[in-house]
Image (cartoon, grey):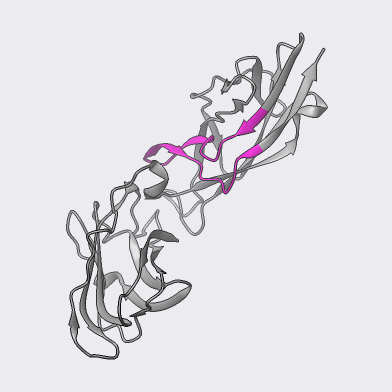
């Protein structure tokens, strides 16, 4: 997965760089199995776990790079990581809200002139402005899909758990997650859905947002049913981070959907 990117441009002539280092604000020695360095969409270097320092603020080092030539037009430098497997008899670990704090480019010279170049990284912004610029590595992620929209009178949302090759803490079984909330927003009022009851599909006991406590190992469908249908319009969306859940010892996690989900609109007369 891509965990960091920055724009880059060379002036006067193309610049060749042999070493790139990324410093992060967590120890990733047991997290990163390997890493790739991209210039635009081309892989220019790879790193292994041995290139990740085992310190509080790990450094991922790409060195002896032979084909990292920055052009005189804007390009994008990207860091991607492959994570270790988490779980029973696995070496991987979970980490939350990690950020790249420093980027260093050294052993640089002009491609035509062969003169040594000092790379200016003063404009590289490594301070995350939003939570979306942080990354986490967890035992399981969740994906939500819409099975039925509000136009039918109620909403059905299915949450699916993706554990990859990760396993449970004490066995080779797949890890389970505990869904705690959906965080559906009503665009008409710009608030949470206060006039809806939420149920596990097939159940009659309502769930309380933020404390569902629904354990899921594969997928689970939830029903949203309006409680007030008197002269009102509802327009519902599920934000990209709307699903809250716990996975093993990692609590307070949120989904990272590719786009918000349209749950439908309905006007009651």
The residue at 17%/58% (across/down) is: 55
Residue 162 falls left or right of residue 3: right
Q: Is residue 169 visible?
A: no
Indicate the position of residue 191 as horizontal and vertical percent values. 56, 21
Q: Nearer the viewer, residue 202 or 129?
A: 129
Indicate the position of residue 219 as horizontal and vertical percent values. 63, 42
Q: Nearer the viewer, residue 263 or 267?
A: 267
Q: Nearer the viewer, residue 267 or 50?
A: 267
Q: Work out which residue is located at the far top of the displayed protein and give it.
A: 230
Toward which corner of the image does residue 184 lie, by quadrant?
top right
Toward which corner of the image does residue 144 lie, by quadrant?
top right
Q: Is residue 252 magenta?
A: yes
Q: Quadrant of the N terminus?
A: bottom left
Q: Is residue 161 magenta?
A: no
Residue 209 falls left or right of residue 264: left
Indicate the position of residue 90 as horizontal and vertical percent values. 37, 59
The residue at 43%/61% (across/down) is: 2
Q: Work out which residue is located at the far front of the displayed protein and give it.
A: 12
Q: Is residue 78 above or below residue 11?
A: above
The residue at 23%/84% (across/down) is: 109
The residue at 29%/81% (across/down) is: 15
Please report the bounds of the magenta region as a residue range.
Answer: 236-261
Q: Is residue 112 above or below residue 167?
A: below
Q: Nearer the viewer, residue 109 or 55?
A: 109
Q: Quadrant of the C terminus?
A: top right
Residue 96 falls left or right of residue 238: left
Q: Is residue 213 above or below residue 23?
A: above
Q: Is residue 59 visible?
A: yes
Indicate the position of residue 132 as horizontal and vertical percent values. 42, 45
């Amino acid at each position: 997965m891509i965990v960091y990117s920055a724009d880059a441009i060379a002036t006067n002539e193309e610049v060749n760089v042999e070493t790139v280092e990324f410093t992060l604000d967590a120890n990733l020695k047991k997290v990163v199995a390997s890493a790739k360095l991209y210039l635009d969409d081309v892989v220019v270097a790879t790193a292994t776990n041995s290139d990740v320092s085992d310190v509080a603020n790990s450094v991922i080092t790409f060195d002896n790079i032979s084909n990292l030539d920055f052009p005189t037009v804007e390009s994008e430098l990207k860091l991607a990581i492959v994570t270790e497997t988490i779980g029973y008899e696995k070496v991987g670990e979970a980490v939350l809200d990690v950020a790249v704090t420093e980027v260093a480019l050294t052993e640089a010279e002009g491609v035509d002139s062969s003169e040594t170049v000092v790379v200016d990284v003063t404009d590289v912004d490594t301070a995350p402005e939003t939570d979306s610029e942080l990354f986490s590595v967890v035992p399981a992620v969740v994906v939500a899909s819409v099975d039925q929209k509000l136009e039918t009178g109620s909403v059905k949302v299915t949450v699916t758990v993706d554990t990859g090759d990760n396993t449970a803490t004490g066995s080779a079984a797949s890890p389970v997650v505990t869904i705690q909330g959906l965080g559906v927003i009503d665009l008409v009022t710009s608030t949470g859905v206060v006039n809806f009851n939420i149920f596990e599909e097939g159940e009659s006991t309502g769930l309380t947002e933020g404390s569902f406590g629904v354990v899921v190992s594969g997928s689970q469908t939830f029903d949203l049913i309006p409680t007030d249908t008197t002269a009102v319009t509802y327009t519902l969306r599920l934000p990209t981070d709307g699903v809250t859940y716990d996975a093993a010892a990692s609590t307070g996690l949120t989904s990272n959907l590719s786009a918000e989900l349209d749950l439908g609109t309905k006007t009651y007369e």
